Structure formats: structure tokens, C-alpha cells
Image (cartoon, helix red, strand yellow):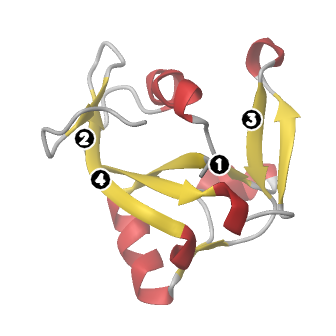
Amino acid sequence: MTWVYKIADVSDWRSARDAGIYGGSVIDAADGYIHLSTGKQLSETARRHYRGRSDLIVARIDLARLEPAVRWEPSRGGDLFPHLYDVLPLATVDSERPARVSEEGQLIFVDGGPPWP
């Protein structure tokens, strides 16, 4: 199974749980798609975009259940990132973990478990 990941604000994620779908963050809405990351990209995404945040959820998502709404598009340094051009059905989420990102940019899972993948 291939996993992709979404870092989200806890309050947005709670609303998504109630609705059964996640429509994305303000940045996702502005860009027209939901930003996802591979396991290799997750730490850098956290460092670049969530530094100093403590109110986060990281969701692990089954990529196969999202296709064909996912497009792999170049981003920083030409690396291909998965972008979801649809809402994210929470039924595709395998698991979720509370997280924070240190001021130095390190992704830390609050539950004390090891990093994904």
C-alpha cells in the first residue's frame, strides 16, 4: 500500500470528522487543491510550513483510494508532490496522530510514537 500524508490544523480536522470530508486549509483553497506529502516529503513540509505549531494532526491516507483525483506536480526543487483536486473523504484515512513542529522545524508526534512511515 502507498501512503500519503496531510498535516492539518486540529480544529479544521475536528470539523472534517463531523462532516466526513476534509475540504482543505485556507492555503489549499487558495491553490485549488489539497496539498499532500509522501513519507519522504513529510518532514520538510512540516519544517517549511508549520514551524512552531503545536495544534496539528498528521493523517496517513491510502493513495489508491484517492486516485484519479491526485495529480503529481512539481514543487520545490522540482520534486513531485501529490495534489488532491477534490475533497478528502475521511474514509481514506488509515490513521491520524497529534503532532507539533518545533521552532527548529522538527516534526514531533505528540503520542510519543516513532515517525511515519
**Which residue shows up at 74% across the image and 35% down it?**
81
Kindly check if marks 4 and 2 are in contact, taking CB atoms under 8 A apart as contact: no
The spot of residue 76 in percent (x, y) is 75, 18
Q: CA distance from mark 1 to mark 4?
A: 21 Å
Which mark lies nearer to you, 4 or 2? 4
- Please report whichever mark, 2 or 1, sits nearer to the chain's N-terminal start: 1
| First in sequence: mark 1 vs mark 4 | 1
In this picture, is 81 found above or below 4? above
Q: Counting residues from the N terminus, which is met first, the one under dot 3 or under dot 2?
A: 2
> Would residue 55 be visible to someone looking at this image?
no
Which residue matches tag 2?
A: 54
The one nearer the camera, 77 or 61, is 61
Say above or below: 89 vs 62.
below
Measuring from the top left, give residue 115's x and y in whole percent: 31, 32
* Element marked by disc 1: helix
Residue 105: where, in percent of width, then height?
36, 18
Q: Amino acid at mark 3?
A: Phe
Q: Which mark is residue 27?
A: 1
Asked if disc 3 and disc 1 are in contact, CB closer than 8 Å, the reply is no
Query: What amino acid is at disc 4?
Result: Arg
How far, Cα to Cα, is label 3 from label 2?
A: 24 Å
